[in-house]
Amino acid sequence: MSISVPLPAPFMPCPGTPAIPFPTWLKMFENYMLVIGATGDSWPEERKRAVLLHALGTEGQRLFYTLPDTGTTYATAIAALKGHFVPKVNVIAERHKFRQRAQRPDETVNQFLASLRELAAVCEFGNMEEQMLCDQLIERVANTRIRDRLLLEPDLTLAKATTLALQIESGLRDANVLSDANATAATAPVRAIQKQPKSSRRWDKKKPAAPAPAKAQPPGNHRSCFRCGSTTHLANNSACPAAKVTCNKCGKVGHFSRVCRSAQKESKKTNSTTASVHCEPSVPDTKQANASEVMVQEIGCAKNFVHKVQIMPNAVPVQQKLRRLPFSVRQAVSEELKDLQDKGIIERIDASPWVSPIVVTQRRDGGRPRMCVDLREPNKAIVADCHPLPHMDELFSNLRGATVFSTIDLASAYHQMPLHPESRDITAFITHEGLFRFCRVPFGLASAPSAFQKMMSIVLAGLPGVQVYLDDIICYGDTQKDHDDNLRRVLHALTNAGLKLNMKKCKFNQSSLNYLGHTISKAGLHPDQDRLTAVINAPAPRDTTSLRSFLGLASWYSKFIPDFATIAEPLRAVLRDSTDLNFQWSVQAETSFTTLKGLIVNSPALALYDPELPTYVTTDASDYGLGAVMTQLHTEQSERVVAFASRTLSPAERKYSTVEREALACVWAVERWRTYLWGRHFVLRTDHQALTTLLTSKGSGRAGLRIARWSARLLCFTYDVTYRPGHLNVTADCLSRLPLTVPNEAADEPDMIAYVFKESLCAISLPEFTSACDDCPELKQLRRQIEKGWPKSTKCLPETIAPYFQVRDELSVHDSLILRGTDRLVVPTTLRARVVDLAHEGHQGIVRTKQRLRELYWWPQLDKLVHSVIASCVNCQYSDKVAVTSPAPLTPVNLPSRPWEKVAIDITGPFENATWDCRYAIVLTDYYSKWPEFLKEESLPSDQAQVSRKRPIQP
């Protein structure tokens, strides 16, 4: 069995200090030789030596050929490289480094021991190495508890010390986790259990709200309403919001539970009591549910979640003016503000650096106007959370096989997430009643969607049969029992998290589901009929703008219609032939318009993608478009369509040959559906038989450069290419011949603008950079010189730090780092080549690479190193970024034995002052006698044969 293993990274691809020490790299290379079976006498010495030199890199090979005693065998080459790259070890200095090595705060015991073993390998401790490691572990371990425990142990060996240290470290880590959990539990408020009224024998359907914290009352006799607690009116006011409300405490009508007097009496009798109540959530029986029985749910409050808004450091607060409201809506706004205050969503304040106005809109049902806060100015200063929202394709794919669905809607979803006290001022808003701010996350806040999605992902993490998109939750199951079990777990998780539902919008035990503009059922995926109103009621376009809008709206449903491009072609023809002033609506366009609306409404169902089923991607290309269809083979041995796709070719792509257009269709389709295909085997079907070889490894040597590059882009996919005759490739052929007018520059997948099939360079971390600065002799000497002070000239300075003398006034020391100015780091010698490689990533030119470096780094002769690295970059040489044209070397010619045995011929001209028949000359020279012959010409000969026919030369 043959094993394909890539070579190790080149040891020295460019001038400078190698990124990996030679002994470490040599071990990697020897492992590679062992894997490919090149050890011992299995390979000849010359071949092993050639592989070694190839793995060294460009600069490594150049240095190797300058070394003495390189020999002709693999062993002598290794010895020569070790003699050059492996410095002679100073045992005293290495032992000093070993004794100075201490455990860092972020380092575990295992990592500390590994570092000590690496240092001890060159200290020549001999039989004392284990004892020295044990002593250094005890002396330099960071945790004093580990040190104290090890000192108490008699006859301590390294193995025993390591075991004890790891056990203590693990125990301390677990203890910290438990203490954090206990601290969280201790800070939770303890609520006493209220007794039920004697007249009530059952639990109330509504969970009693937590009593609001008592507010400090100003001195004096301030009368308040005993129904709602407001100080702005008394209980006899007919506008009191609590006049017809049922109390959750005593069950009586006419007051809120927070001012219930029976609850106050019970609380006086209650001492410090702790109780635990476990509620098993039940699955709602939707068959017996009645809208009149569904009570209005209170606003919940998420437990253990607080959203803190991140504000840009240079943000300037904006205070906007009050927008005056019409008198007809002021009373409704006042009631809304009062309701939000009672629920603890907003609070009144006196001043805030941020002030936003409110906007009032009418509700769809014609009820009380909706009050919204215009947070556009604060949103400009907010750093949005980066938690991703799930993609529709991912959500739909996870619903495969489901037959029973339920949708759960949270009541005022964002208002159930508490807002951090430090983040409340940015949500302040001004009304005709004064200044308020939010205590919960408001709608319209830039960071709210990502933060809420993150919270819901944590709350429902690990639960099967549930998908969440912001406040829309789907619970599903393959059977009724699976659905009920999944729903019970979801409701239990939401209850534990303190979240409340909007029962009016929840739907349970549904055979189909309307979700994100789609209808999902056992049959597959349909467009949501409720969302098709705009398409169904769309009038016939009367100008290019309305036609372009209709095509954009209808194109969103193109994945449901296999021949969408064919039917829409007359509409696109109208766009091509019409202008804004001359709109030419034809009979064919009217037929296409009517047919298209009918097919969108009655479109077939698409199958939901199943990663366990065989997948086929069928492509085709015409002279002006590409088409593709993705299908899967189901258990009934029939292929079901998962998605359709098509696009037009750009003017440049239309000039491709037939095989190149067919190959482009394959590459475009695979990359478009990368989310489905990457990491899984699939079959790529084409009606061009040559591609079955050209897009595989078999045809890599026969494909043109363009197809070879496209084939390289597909290396990360696992697929087989099969031939399908054109008469069987009807769907993809139709899509390609009348494709969608999609600009080629627009990417279909926003997260896949570019895919680089290459291992990225590793960035340099701050600990690594600091460690390199500590170990760099040049920077050590420079640091001491800066702290000591600079002399008046460079005569007293060592050669290594003399180049720093010109910028001595700009250098400063901060901990272990040296800065030039305020923002540029001085790079240690061991990291300079690596920093240049990072700046050169993407093969930027010399100027751009130096610009990127000068923004953050500096060292002497930076420009020289950049020029050297880019000059040795093969890719940059190919792209002619650093190519330097040099004349070919002169080659001596041996003297012929007789005249006219060897001649040279060339063409010269044109001559500016010559006559028309002497503008060019053919020159022939004998190498032996140097005798020249000239032939005048009025123009350049077209080929070599024409030159030879001018005048035959007889030797």
Image (cartoon, rainbow, N blue to C red):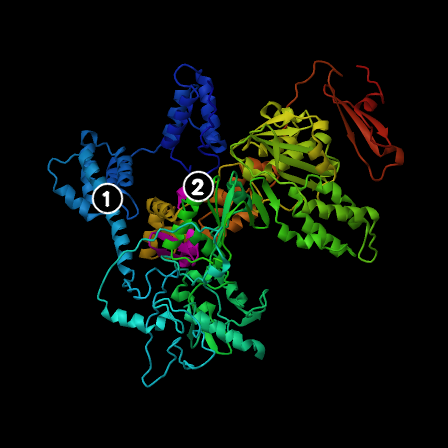
Amino acid type at circle 1 is: Glu
Regarding mark 1 in the picture, which secondary structure is present there?
Answer: helix
- Where is residue 516? Give x, y as percent: 56, 50
Residue 46, percent across and down? 46, 18
**Distance from the alpha carbon under mark 2 to that under mark 1:** 46 Å
Percent across and percent down for residue 629 are 64, 36
Judging depth in this view, the residue of 651 and 46 nearest the camera is 651
Q: Is residue 895 above or below residue 695?
A: above
Q: Quadrant of residue 563?
A: top right
Circle 2: element type = helix
Residue 306 within the magenta-colored segment of the rendering: no
Badge 2: few (under 14), some or many (20 or more) residues near its Cα, within 10 Å?
Answer: few
| Residue that lies at the very extreme toward the bottom in this rendered image | 220
The answer to whether residue 411 is seen in the rendering is no
Name the residue tied to disc 1.
169
| Magenta span | 805-833
Closer to us: 308 or 153: 308
Position of residue 933 relative to residue 556, above or below, is above
Does residue 542 lie above or below 252 as drawn?
Answer: above
Residue 555: assigned label? none
Report the mark closest to the observer, 2 or 1. Answer: 2
- Taking depth in this image into account, of 771 and 15 the one nearest to the observer is 771
Query: What's the amino acid at mark 2?
Result: Lys
Disc number for residue 481: 2
Quarter the C terminus occupies: top right
- Image quarter of residue 463: top left
